[in-house]
Image (cartoon, rainbow, N blue to C red):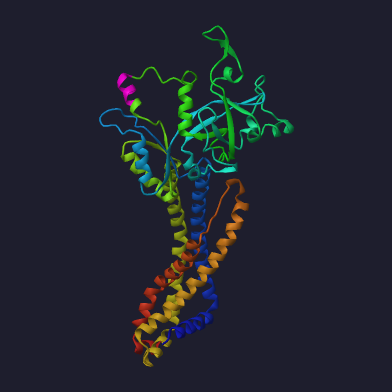
């Protein structure tokens, strides 16, 4: 018989016993809906945690620090190391990083900021892209250029009360890109205080830099709150001129540690992976080289392990209901074979192949499975909309990706076919003489 004949006969035979067919398909519907909804809740849990981690920062950004151990052969974080990071497969960019906290003065208002010195050519790779203006690529030690985050304008405060400016009209005049901004690492220097010089004259304390703000970028969900970005080499030169105002290194370090610290040219390097999948591989390679690393991707890996366990548990619970539906399908097919024993005998006498008998019952079972799978999937989409309303306090989130939707229908069909396999083989082995005599 042709394949179309099997399906035509299958629909006819199932329709002849439509109540039993509907009940069996309904059991399969409930089983599929249970397993899809439970797995989708696990996927939603995984996605929710992933998004919450992404809000804390980029999952592809890796902070690399010198090793803590100072015994034996110690990895050095220097230019050669940065070049090696850039050559790693899966790495998009790498840059050394300096971080200090200077003061900015805008008119009479003052704001402390976190100033990062990086290779500004790599800034776009770290999503440090100007929302307005441009990158600071042309500054000098005496006239530095800085790109600020978009929350710095709101952080300027009156130095007498240290209360942030709330008047909207005043805020308009504090636009960093349109204002005369000065920067200093010492508050007294910024406020223009003087001291007696060697020649007996009054001289201004410290270094006060007239700063050009070239652009404004996003603070990336508060990951770079009230921050600025400047070319690494320029900040390095400025820091050398202001050593007395910068935090001193700890005094309890021994001579060996001090010598090693001098060889460690950089205290931190940012590495940007091309994507989340390659980030963990890059982290493992850098750690194997002896460096310390920090990345939100480590937290994500931990969440993934928990998520897989939860999804597996939920899938197992849903699988029980689908197993029950499979047993129901097997029972339905067994009853159908007992009722159609004479029909099977006639088909054999007329010359039907044994495989035709087998395929006939498997196709009927597959039809039940697919119908149950499709209706179960439709029920799952309905429950997906309903669950957040019913369980609003638990903040349940259900996500049904295409692979789960297609897989559920296919899996339901396979479960139905496997459930009907034993009854179908039994039908294939029935003796024609016995079958014809059956009432």
Task: Please tell me which residue is depicted at 56% across the width and 22% down the height of the picture.
Answer: 208
**Any magenta on residue 257?**
yes
Q: Position of residue 157 (x, y in %)?
A: 65, 26
Please tell me whether the stretch drawn in magenta is mainly helix, strand or loop.
helix
Instruction: Looking at the picture, tell me which residue is in the foreground, 367 or 73.
Output: 73
Q: Does any portion of residue 322 appear in the rendered image?
A: yes
Quarter of the N terminus within the rendering: bottom left
Q: In the drawing, does residue 146 fall left or right of residue 336?
A: right
The residue nearer to you, when weighing 288 against 142, is 142
The span picked out in magenta is: 254-260
Q: Nearer the viewer, residue 335 or 78?
A: 78
* Residue 399 is one of the magenta-drawn residues: no
Check the image and name the residue furthest to the bottom.
350
- In the rendered image of this protein, does residue 186 appear above or below residue 44? above
Quadrant location of the C terminus in the rendered image: bottom left
Q: Residue at x 45, y 32 (%)?
A: 233
As drawn, 419 above or below 144: below
Q: Locate residue 234, reporting x and y percent.
A: 48, 31
Give the mark count: 0
Nearer to the camera, 102 or 65: 102
The residue sitting at 40% across, 89% down in the picture is: 347
- Residue 57, given in percent of the width and then of the height, sits at 50, 41
């Amino acid at each position: 018989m042709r394949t179309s004949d099997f399906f035509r006969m299958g629909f006819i035979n199932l329709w002849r016993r439509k109540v039993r067919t509907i009940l069996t398909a309904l059991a399969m519907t409930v089983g599929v809906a249970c397993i899809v909804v439970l797995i989708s809740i696990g996927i939603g849990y995984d996605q929710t945690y992933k998004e919450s981690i992404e809000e804390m920062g980029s999952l592809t950004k890796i902070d690399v620090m010198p090793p803590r151990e100072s015994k034996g052969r110690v990895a050095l974080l220097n230019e050669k190391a940065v070049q090696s990071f850039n050559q790693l497969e899966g790495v998009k960019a790498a840059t050394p990083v300096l971080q200090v906290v200077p003061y900015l003065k805008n008119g009479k208002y003052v704001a402390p900021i976190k100033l990062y010195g990086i290779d500004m050519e790599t800034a776009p790779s770290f999503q440090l892209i100007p929302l307005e203006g441009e990158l600071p690529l042309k500054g000098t030690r005496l006239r530095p250029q800085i790109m600020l985050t978009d929350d710095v304008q709101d952080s300027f405060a009156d130095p007498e009360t240290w209360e942030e400016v709330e008047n909207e009209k005043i805020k308009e005049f504090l636009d960093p890109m349109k204002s005369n901004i000065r920067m200093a690492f010492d508050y007294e220097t910024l406020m223009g205080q003087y001291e007696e010089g060697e020649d007996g004259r009054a001289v201004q304390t410290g270094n006060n830099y007239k700063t050009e703000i070239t652009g404004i970028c996003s603070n990336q969900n508060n990951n770079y709150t009230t921050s600025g970005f400047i070319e690494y080499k320029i900040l390095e030169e400025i820091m050398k001129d202001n050593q007395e105002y910068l935090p001193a290194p700890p005094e309890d370090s021994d001579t060996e540690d001090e010598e090693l610290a001098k060889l460690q040219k950089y205290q931190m390097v940012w590495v940007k992976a091309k994507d989340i999948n390659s980030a963990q591989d890059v982290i493992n390679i850098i750690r194997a080289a002896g460096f310390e690393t920090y990345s939100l991707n480590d937290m994500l890996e931990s969440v993934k392990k928990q998520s897989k366990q939860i999804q597996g548990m939920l899938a197992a619970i849903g699988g029980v209901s689908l197993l029950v539906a499979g047993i129901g399908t097997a029972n339905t097919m067994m009853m159908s074979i007992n009722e159609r024993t004479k029909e099977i005998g006639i088909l054999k006498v007329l010359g039907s192949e044994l495989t035709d008998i087998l395929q006939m019952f498997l196709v009927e079972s597959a039809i039940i499975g697919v119908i149950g799978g499709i209706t179960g999937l439709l029920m799952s989409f309905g429950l997906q909309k309903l669950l957040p309303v019913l369980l609003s306090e638990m903040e349940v989130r259900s996500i049904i990706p295409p692979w789960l939707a297609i897989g559920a229908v296919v899996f339901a069909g396979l479960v139905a076919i496997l459930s009907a396999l034993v009854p179908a083989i039994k039908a294939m082995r029935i003796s024609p003489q016995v079958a014809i005599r059956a009432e």
